[in-house]
Image (cartoon, rainbow, N blue to C red):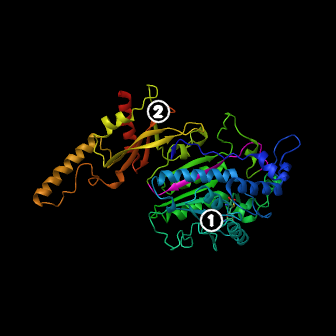
Amino acid sequence: MIWNQPVVAPHYDFNSLIEDHPDLQKLITVDGHYSFSHQPTVRTLTAAILKKYHGITSELSPHHLCPRVPNRYLYLQWLSQISEIILPKGDWSMISVVDIGTGSSAIYPLLGASMNKGWKFVGTECNEGSYKLAMANIGRNPWVEGKIKVVKVVDPRKILDFTKISIDNNNNNNNKDQLVLVMCNPPFFDTELKNSVEFDTKIAATKLVATDSELFYPGGEIRFIKQMIAESVVQQQHVNRWYTSMVGQFTSLKPIIEELKTKGIINFGIFELNPGHHHNNNNGKNIDQGLDRYIDDGSSNTPIIRWVVFWSFQATHIPDFLGHQYSNKYKGLNGLITTFKINLKTPRINIVPVIFDKLLKPLNCIEISTSKMMMFKGTNNPSDEFNVVEVVVAGDVWSRAYRRKLKRLTAVTTKTESENPGVAVKKQRGSGVLFPDKDKSIFQVIFDDVHNQIVVFWKFGYNEKIFESFCGLVNREVNST
Ligand SMILES: C[S@@+](CC[C@H](N)C(=O)[O-])C[C@H]1O[C@@H](n2cnc3c(N)ncnc32)[C@H](O)[C@@H]1O
């Protein structure tokens, strides 16, 4: 993985698309702006982008929602980045993505399979017409054979019915080595809005074409995602599952996050999908901004931001650059902070090796290792690799309280051992067996050369206090070095 790598929309060259499909000229208005309200041409554009840039053959139905590619791409790119955190050295063929409501285009499975060759997808769909069209679209792409399945949902009130969603060919949904990523682009609107004046003026005026099941759900996206949360809670013993969903309206975030908190879920976060974020081209200028408006609601003049909410019952964490929003408007909406940054006073000196030798090695770690990580440098140049130290500890092994507790327990252990030789020998210092597993934590200490910072990432653990205490420890060492 590349630390701090932004999730950005790909570069689609509109001029070259027009050369291949002169019809696309219709999307440019007389005053030279883009307009994405002419649905047949938007379909041509989508199919052209999918073919030219992603090798996907598609036929997009004139009666169904036409997916805009950049948003979908961003969501999948983010998903792929978080997988590298959850399954760092893992086998990517062990990743299955479940796409709830895959739609007539099967956009997420097709695009996702083109981006990550190892991934397998199961799409679910409740609308008969969409289901058939999705199957046909998948059939048009023989290169995905065996990688994508679509399940026809009979009872749409059940969203995450894993008794029907078999993620591997042996119908084995309990393989704990398998990482299951649930993704979803839910119907946005409340069914009640359907015949309202508000809907007519706001949405119908954009000439958006879609079926009812694509747009409406009783209670809208909030209720849909709350239902996903409720169903995930009953499956929480399946810790290999990560749940994510796109959110279409900012105002939906608050009730969704509140629901997660009410259900006692602490490992959650929000990520902003902004199709206006591009990699700079080689001249340092931003590439074609016009296509930013090629989004689900083609009426807008500014790129529309969507969000992904995610949650899990695992104690593996997602770094803040992929799951935490710093702007004030997200106050109260964020999950746990998992990344702590310490600014270095001396310019660009990597003190991670010093921290390794002086501070971390002498600790009672279950494991300590060093590795390399790529750091995103803000250019298209390959980034350098930096030292990362990873420590696995049984708890706050650096604290006086821990040492006292350890001493007490070791004394008891030694006594028991002398009375019953061989009974308690397994309890070695720092082995992690003395304290409950809930205190086990994994931290990474990374040198961020770009920002001249030491970054502490809380990779795994249930106990936030231990992370805070570890950050304090590293901070003191950095400041005294
Ligand atoms: C907003 S559309 C998204 C389609 C596609 N994933 C995309 O991003 O373009 C929502 C889809 O969810 C489907 N859907 C709604 N409720 C569902 C349920 N309970 N299970 C499966 N699919 C459902 C709808 O039929 C529709 O195709």
Q: Is 476 on the left-hand or right-hand side of 56? A: left
The amino acid on which the numbered mark 2 sits, given as a three-letter code, is Gln
Q: Is 114 on the left-hand or right-hand side of 357? A: right
Q: Residue at x 22, y 54 (%)?
A: 427
Which labelled disc corresponds to residue 453? 2
Residue 465: x percent and y percent? Answer: 38, 44
Question: Contact, CB < 8 Å: mark 1 with mark 2?
Answer: no
Residue 151: x percent and y percent? Answer: 62, 71
Q: CA distance from mark 1 to mark 2?
A: 43 Å
Residue 65: x percent and y percent? Answer: 75, 60
Which labelled disc corresponds to residue 144? 1
Q: Residue at x 41, y 41 (%)?
A: 388
Q: Quadrant of residue 143?
A: bottom right
Residue farthest along the right direction in this orientation: 30
Give the magenta range: 298-314
Name the foreground residue: 289 vs 102. Answer: 289
The amino acid on which the numbered mark 1 sits, given as a three-letter code, is Val
Is 313 one of the magenta-colored residues? yes
Vertical position of residue 169 compared to residue 230: above or below = below
Which quadrant of the rendered structure holds the C terminus? top left
Q: Residue at x 46, y 43 (%)?
A: 373
